[in-house]
Image (tube, rainbow, N blue to C red):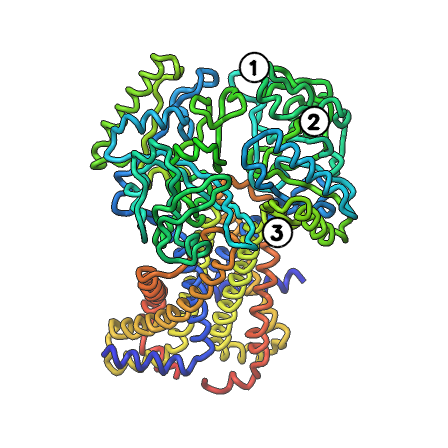
Amino acid sequence: MTGTAAMDIRPILSTLMRHKIASLLIVLEIALTCAIVCNALFLIGDRLDRMNMHSGIADHELVRIQAASLRQLSSDDAVDKSVSLEYLDTLRKVPGVRQAAIVSQLPFGGSSNNSSVNLTSDQERPTLDATVYTDEGSLVKTFGLKLLAGRDFNSDEFQDITDLQKAGDKAQIPVAIINRSMAEKLYPGQNAVGKVFYSWTESPTRVIGVVEELARPNSLDQGAYAMIFPLRDYGAGKHYILRTEPGRRAEVLDAAIKALKKTDPNLLVVNQDTFDEVRARYFEQDRAMAWMLVVVIVALLLVTALGIVGLASFWVQQRTKQIGVRRALGATRGQILRYFQLENFLLATVGIALGMLLAYSINQLLMGKYELPRLPLHYLPIGAIALWLLGQAAVFGPARRAAAVPPAVATRSV
Amino acid sequence: MFGYYLNLALRSFRRNKALTALMVLAIALGIGASMTTLTVFHVLSGDPIPDKSDRLFYVQLDPEPMRGYRPGEEPQSQLTRFDSETLLKQKRGLRQTLTSGGNVVISSDKPGTTPQLVDARYASADFFPMFDVPLRYGRAWTASEDDAKARVAVISKELNDKEFGGGDSTGKTLHIAPNDFRIIGVLDAWRLTPRFYDLYNDNYGATEGVFMPFSTARDLDLGTQGNTNCWADSNGDSRALNAPCAWVQYWVELDSAGKAADFRSYLVNYSNQQRAAGRFERPANVRLRNVMELMAFNKVVPGDVRLQLWLALGFLLVCLVNTVGLLLAKFLRRSGEIGVRRALGASRMEIFKQCVVEAGTVGLAGGVFGLLLALLGLWAVRQQPASYASLAHLDGSMLLLTFVLAVAASLLAGLLPAWRAMQVTPAIQLKSQ
């Protein structure tokens, strides 16, 4: 079997050597396509990873109302507080609402409050930059966060953020809950509960709980660090988060807005949506980019396939007489078919080998320019297989036409 | 001769319809993709204010404490309120303005309307002449109105159309609850791409609805929007005059680009004075970038747009290689015909010319279809969620570039096949017939 294969390859190689330019062009086209397709697939994978990032919260059970009242425009802390509590109370009574919380920000919500975190009070450079969630009293339960260690806040640990601001140098945030990424970065290999860090105030803050995940509202490339402070922030335009059953979200949102409008005719709703919508909006650009890459891949494969069909047809036409001679000398249709298939396989293999090198160099370039990770090696065989299959599919038509050349052609002059 | 070759090319297209269609399609796809992404790139990376982009400068100072200092490191991207107000008072440029984004709640007298949140811009008087802001009605506010913290506002054309039904609304009252503002000016249609004067809000977003004096906004403690960076305790009010927080953008217009060095040394002097007074701790570390330098430094053009451009150019390259191969097949398939022409006395150069004309015609057809694809592509871009999406339109220069690119690309693709074709030896071809 190997003997016949070797015998098959030799005439193919000598034919290709006589059509150097055309062979080179096919190889080049396959190499370029292979390189671009590998990188595009990788970019799609990268986007999909981003889009599927865990939020840490109960994605499908939450709705968000970002609201304020015109009464809050006077910038009076007491009014802010009474309005917020009134809203929260109203929302808790809406049928279907299991939990409700006031939060300053939410995962993938866009705008965020961030703070540098130090391990000692006199550190030169901060250890990390974490996003700050303020908890009015029921954030952990409402978001549905999973505590890995430690506990949730006790009711006596909460303080008004306005009191904290008034305290000036004496301000303290004694306890906080942090997410796992932050715990592992601050205290690698240790139990974070009971440890302290410095952020926001001059006094130490002690970790009392670690949650599995809690994603940032934005700047996802700054590291997935998040912390929760037990601070009641009643400023205008905060987010009211309601937890309900997945099937009742639309109904609850509708009823909640109606209930709020009834209690306060001066209601100003900035945003009202389900968390799934918040998330989808945040990753809209990534989804659009992923689709664009898909279109490019399809178009590239199409153009390359058509190019192979065109050149292969030309070769078949050009060699009609030789094919006739081979047929007359006893070659079967299958052998003629396999000849062209093998020829394409050889060209594709050289193209793919070159393409992989090129794919790797393009990735190096992208890594430098766009801070992309290294191309994982498993994308290379995917690209290779795609192009082998594409080549075989494209050459099949012309090859079959070649196989159909009757031996009698050898006796005619073309 | 050209006419004859064109005729020959058209005949050849008719003979090989499928192959010709394939080539035109390949070029059209490549051109369409490239032109779509090039146009987006062109729109986003263009000079937003070409007349004076080299004379408008963005100022940065380093007001942070010594802790964490590394020489030569980029200072805060914005100024503190104290520094920006002080620089404004010292008036060392031809014009200068301090500005910040914000949002205000507008309520209307009209029954049945609900209050709405509108993007606002707080600035000092020079903002309008500095950034060539076009006014449809009325006027911008003056420096004395800045000083008086006057309750005056300039509104955008869009807000004027929506709230006041268009027309000259100067003199009308704008309720920015709980206060009343007098409208003194209405903008004409105006949209900077990008909105370079504030790179800390949506760079390609729409123009703000309400403009008012910065001093008035601070007087009324109106909400701001954008980045705020504090390096010490601000006692709860990061907008206070002496808060250790950077959140204000400061721009200066100079007589000429050459005055930048003078202005820079003024900023260094200012930093040294502040350090002597104990307000600054670090050695003078200033930045003074003009519009294009600032945009380049902040990488304003989204990375995705650059990536798409490279991707499209890569795609065009594949399409070109493809075209080279197909043209080669096409020309050599006619070796017999070429042999006859050569035997009848056509020189190699004439064969070459004939092939190049044919390649160019393919390119032109590819260009026309590519243009249609680019229009389709730009339409698709406009459906995208990004805020720059609505800006993706083809202009005259890009239209011209489409055809130049298409024809140049296919001529380039035609060179090698044409060169091969002209080397066809008449004797062998005639013999094999």
Q: Residue B76: which quarter of the image?
A: top left
> Is residue A251 visible from the viewing direction of this image?
yes
Three-letter amino acid code of the residue under disc 1: Asp
Q: Quadrant where the C terminus of chain A lies?
A: bottom left
Q: Is residue B196 left or right of residue B346?
A: right
Instruction: State which tag comes first along the sequence, 3 or 1.
Output: 1
Q: Which mark is residue A381?
A: 3
Q: Which residue is mark 1?
A: A169
Q: Quadrant of the N terminus of chain A?
A: bottom right
Q: State the image coordinates of residue B331 (x, y, percent, origin top left).
A: 38, 74
Question: What residue is rendered at 72% in x and 28% in y?
Answer: A210
Residue B71 higher or lower than B10, as above or below: above
As helix, strand or loop, the secondary structure at mark 1 comes to: helix
Q: Nearer the viewer, residue A248 or A319?
A: A248
Q: Nearer the viewer, residue A14 or B113?
A: B113
| Residue A162 drawn at (x, y percent) | 60, 25
> Gap between marks 3 and 1, in whole Å?
61 Å
- Distance between the Cα atoms at labels 2 and 3? 44 Å
- The residue that label 2 is drawn on is A177
